[in-house]
Amino acid sequence: MTLKALKTRGTRIAAAFAFAAAAASGALSFPAAAHADTMTINIAFKGASQRAVWQQVLDEFRKAHPNVDVKASFVDEEAYKVQLPGWLTTVAPDIVNWHNGERMAYYARRGLFEDLSGDWKKNNWDSTYASTKEASTVDGKQYAAPTVYYSWGLFYRKDLFQKAGIAGEPKTWDQLMDACRKLKAAGITPFAVGGRDAWTLAGWFDYLDLRLNGNAFHQKLMAGEIPYTDPRVKKVYTTWKQLIDDHDFIDNSLSYDLDAAQPFLFQGKAAMMLMGTFITGGFPANVKPQMGYFQFPIIDANVPTAEDGPVESLHIPSRAKNKADAHAFLAFVETPEVGAQLAKGLGSLSANSKSPEPEDPISKIGFQILANTKGGIAQFYDRDMTKEMADEGMKGMQQFISDPTRLDSILAQLEETRKRIYKK
């Protein structure tokens, strides 16, 4: 190599060292390369339509925030319930969807959900989500961003009612029992229920308790303030037992989860199902025109009518890594437009008070049921109650369905559990 070449090479090496030193010291400035921050979100869903609407919302967020790389994991709802505690206590995603009320409070009290009170103030959620603020609050702080809520009631096949000679939707318990007798005479089972999912049984407990004893009593029971050996609690089960003894439910209901129980309705083998409106997105096209929906009938006219109206919500885990983009995602979703979009796809009602009223006929009925309720709105059995007690309570319901003659021993065991958990 010539002397000139060596000098040139030395100059280049020296220049390279100088550039590196300047860059390290911050003396140089140049445009930063565009990069994408990753935001992870875990979503519980039931059915293709629910997954599809969440995918639409995520795609729209990506367009509005091109520098955010969204990594979404869709998990079946039953598996999600089992896996959520592990996520929150180890490597947490940046966003999770979950349930408001006691279900939310359980994790908030343990420091596993981020305080969102600042988001509520900044985004004026106090106004647009006024009706769901209480369910989003623990010890004066908000930990949830509400998305949708939904009505519970009785779905039914209009054509099967007509076939059995049932003139109209039952308004009272006696009318419902008469409808059951007519359906059985026509060879049709009155109710489909998937008892393998214990929470579907909890819907029956809720409505029988709300109709027999009212929401004030129901909430005291949920709070552990009433013994399970109280005769009013036993009356809920003995009323339920009447339906079991009369063979008003499909056989072997504990063998079916919700997805497996719905075909009884779709195939015309059962006429009714007590469920939330979120299942409407999965109705087959050929069956949907025959599906009707009505309010759970009145049992005692002296008891103010209350309803289940569970609120779904989004949360930022305390261990989330990308909280900045997570807060941006909440602000994006908590708008009237996205609220209405989610409500339509999830078979629910938008929690945003500025969203338009639903167009779907069943959602409209659900909206009117909740809007006109005078006796209060409950979240749902396992959302109004401490998780451990709810789990034991629903296990007791499955034991009751399996063998109703064990009722007294089941209630005695639940009472021992209540004393242990609530120390009352």
Image (cartoon, grey):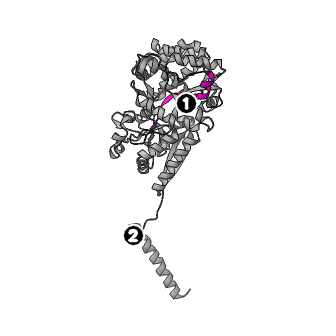
- Residue 263, percent from left and from top: 64, 31
Disc 1 secondary structure class: strand
- Residue 293, percent from left and from top: 53, 29
Task: Give the numbered dot on residue 292.
Answer: 1
Which residue is at 49% across, 18% downward?
A: 172
Q: Nearer the viewer, residue 51 or 296?
A: 296
Q: Which residue is mark 2?
A: 29
Residue 215 visible in the current orientation: yes
Q: Nearer the viewer, residue 308 or 405?
A: 308
Which stretch appears magenta?
A: 144-164
Which residue is at 52% across, 21% downward?
A: 170
Label 1 or label 2, whichever lies nearer to me, is 1
Decide: few, some or many residues near mark 2? Use Cα within 10 Å; few <14, some 14-19, many ≥20. few
- Residue 340, percent from left and from top: 46, 43
- Residue 96, percent from left and from top: 48, 42
Q: Nearer the viewer, residue 258 or 69?
A: 258
Decide: few, some or many residues near mark 1? Use Cα within 10 Å; few <14, some 14-19, many ≥20. some
Say how many tags the image has: 2
Q: Is residue 150 magenta?
A: yes
Which residue is at 33% across, 40% downward?
A: 127
Residue 245 sits above or below residue 132 on the image: above
Residue 102 visible in the current orientation: no
